[in-house]
């Protein structure tokens, strides 16, 4: 069934409304998809669960409609985004906010990430300013002040690095080299603090905007830095709503590695997280109950790509069949036909066929057309050097127990 989710929820006027877009997280859920599911299949007071929470949009929408929720993700960024987005209406006045930024500007505390490649990603000229700004944030004891600064400072820090912030993965490009060369020729300190002020005020306004949706006081659990493939639910949930990784589409830890180092995580911890990412980890083989899985597997000729294909489906199918045992009503899984060497893989059909074996009935699949992308468009995939075409549709699979 064809649907344009962004037009289905009048109370959320656009996809980047309020705290639904305070940080550019790869492959982020649009809030209208979750709102659509909750309004159509749920009742306020139910508990919803997202085992691949990413940005945490499921929880932020659940609050608006009065649903309890549980969020899991491998990436610790989940907790930072969630704590920021749910802090409520800021108590600081505009004057106090300006004073807070001035205090950061005059800070003499220092923090430098424990990162071997630090000098590769940051010009030495920027180090004193960055280290004092982060020293101030890490030493800030007042929670509201801290969370009003963290995400804005992450954004500005990324801009003042050699990385190309137009690309999610940590990547040096011609654009980013030119960006830094241009900054070094200007009064870059003034630009740094002006950008930080703009980002802080943008977040401040988005927090007030979210409050207009009247988020409710609900019970929630957020687990970041955990492995969904080996973690068990403590209690039953009513609805599972999630968007798992799309085959080899994203490397979420690599995409946010720069941010994680500035947040204080060390190299060993970040490498350990990267090693657990789907589909680049080794997972136990399972019996797959999907003819479509085998049909498309035959089309993949390259051994390493077939390995990734297998690992991906062993990971997500085993997770859904295992976690589904504690889901009482619906599983709503949002995926797109990601490509392997330009072969679109019908991930949704494979999930449906496999989960039928575990007692799940396929109710409907909603097909949503993608209108915009945060990621840059490119005719050539920089990783493979081959022609690249982005996913044009995303599919919401609804399964009932």
Image (spheres, rainbow, N blue to C red):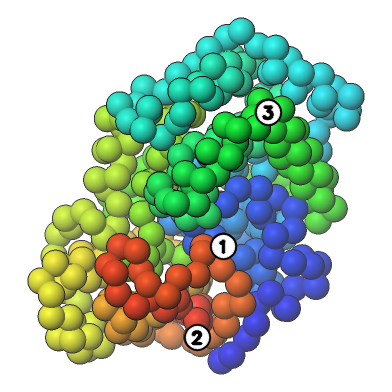
Q: Tell which of 25 and 75 is nearer to you.
A: 25
Q: For the residue carrying disc 1, how many other residues have a C-alpha within 10 Å: few (<14), some (14-19), or many (20+)?
A: few
State the CA–CA distance, disc 2 to disc 1: 25 Å
User: Residue 391, position in %: x, y?
Assistant: 45, 78
Q: Tell which of 182 and 65 is nearer to you.
A: 182
Q: Is residue 50 visible?
A: yes
Q: Quadrant of residue 248?
A: bottom left
Front tag of 2 and 1: 1
State the CA–CA distance, disc 1 to disc 3: 29 Å
Question: Which residue position is annotated with label 3?
Answer: 187
Front tag of 1 and 3: 3
Say which quadrant the C terminus sits in: bottom left
- In the displayed structure, would residue 53 be above or below residue 303? above
Disc nearer the start of the sequence (2/1): 2
Please tell me whether mark 3 sits on a helix, a strand or a loop: loop
262 with respect to 350 (left or right):
right
Q: For the residue carrying disc 2, how many other residues have a C-alpha within 10 Å: few (<14), some (14-19), or many (20+)?
A: many
Please tell me whether mark 2 sits on a helix, a strand or a loop: strand
Find residue 365 and name its label: 2
Say which quadrant the N terminus sits in: bottom right
Q: Farthest front residue?
A: 185
Front tag of 3 and 2: 3
142 with respect to 364 (left or right):
right
Q: Farthest left residue?
A: 303
Question: Which residue position is annotated with label 1?
Answer: 374
């Amino acid at each position: 069934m064809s649907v344009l989710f962004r037009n289905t929820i009048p109370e959320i006027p656009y996809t980047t409304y309020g705290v639904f877009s305070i940080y550019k997280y790869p492959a982020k859920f649009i809030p209208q998809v979750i709102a659509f599911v909750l309004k159509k299949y749920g009742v306020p007071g139910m508990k919803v669960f997202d085992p691949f929470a990413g940005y945490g949009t499921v929880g932020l929408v659940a609050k608006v409609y009065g649903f309890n929720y549980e969020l899991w993700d491998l990436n610790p960024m989940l907790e930072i985004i969630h704590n920021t987005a749910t802090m409520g209406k800021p108590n600081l006045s505009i004057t106090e906010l300006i004073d807070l930024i001035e205090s950061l500007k005059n800070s003499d505390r220092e923090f430098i990430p424990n990162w071997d490649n630090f000098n590769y990603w940051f010009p030495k000229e920027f180090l004193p300013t960055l280290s004092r700004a982060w020293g101030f944030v890490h030493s800030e004891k007042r929670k509201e002040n801290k969370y009003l600064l963290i995400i804005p400072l992450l954004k500005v820090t990324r801009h003042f690095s050699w990385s190309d912030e137009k690309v999610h993965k940590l990547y040096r490009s011609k654009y980013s080299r030119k960006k830094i060369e241009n900054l070094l020729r200007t009064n870059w300190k003034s630009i740094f603090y002006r950008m930080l002020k703009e980002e802080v005020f943008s977040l401040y306004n988005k927090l007030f905007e979210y409050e207009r949706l009247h988020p409710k006081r609900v019970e929630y659990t957020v687990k970041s830095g955990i492995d969904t493939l080996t973690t068990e639910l403590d209690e039953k949930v009513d609805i599972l709503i999630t968007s798992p990784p799309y085959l080899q589409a994203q490397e979420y830890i690599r995409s946010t590695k720069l941010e994680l180092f500035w947040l204080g995580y060390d190299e060993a911890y970040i490498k350990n997280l990267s090693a657990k990412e789907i589909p680049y980890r080794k997972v136990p083989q399972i019996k797959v109950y999907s003819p479509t899985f085998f049909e498309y597997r035959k089309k993949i000729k390259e051994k390493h790509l077939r390995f990734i294909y297998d690992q991906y489906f062993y990971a997500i199918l085993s997770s859904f069949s295992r976690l589904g045992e504690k889901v009482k009503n619906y599983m709503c899984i949002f995926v797109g036909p990601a490509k392997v060497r330009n072969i679109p893989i019908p991930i949704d059909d494979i999930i449906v066929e496999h989960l039928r074996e575990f007692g799940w009935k396929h109710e409907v699949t909603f097909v949503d057309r993608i209108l915009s992308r945060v990621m840059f468009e490119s005719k050539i995939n920089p990783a493979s050097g081959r022609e690249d075409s982005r996913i044009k549709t995303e599919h919401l699979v609804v399964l009932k127990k």
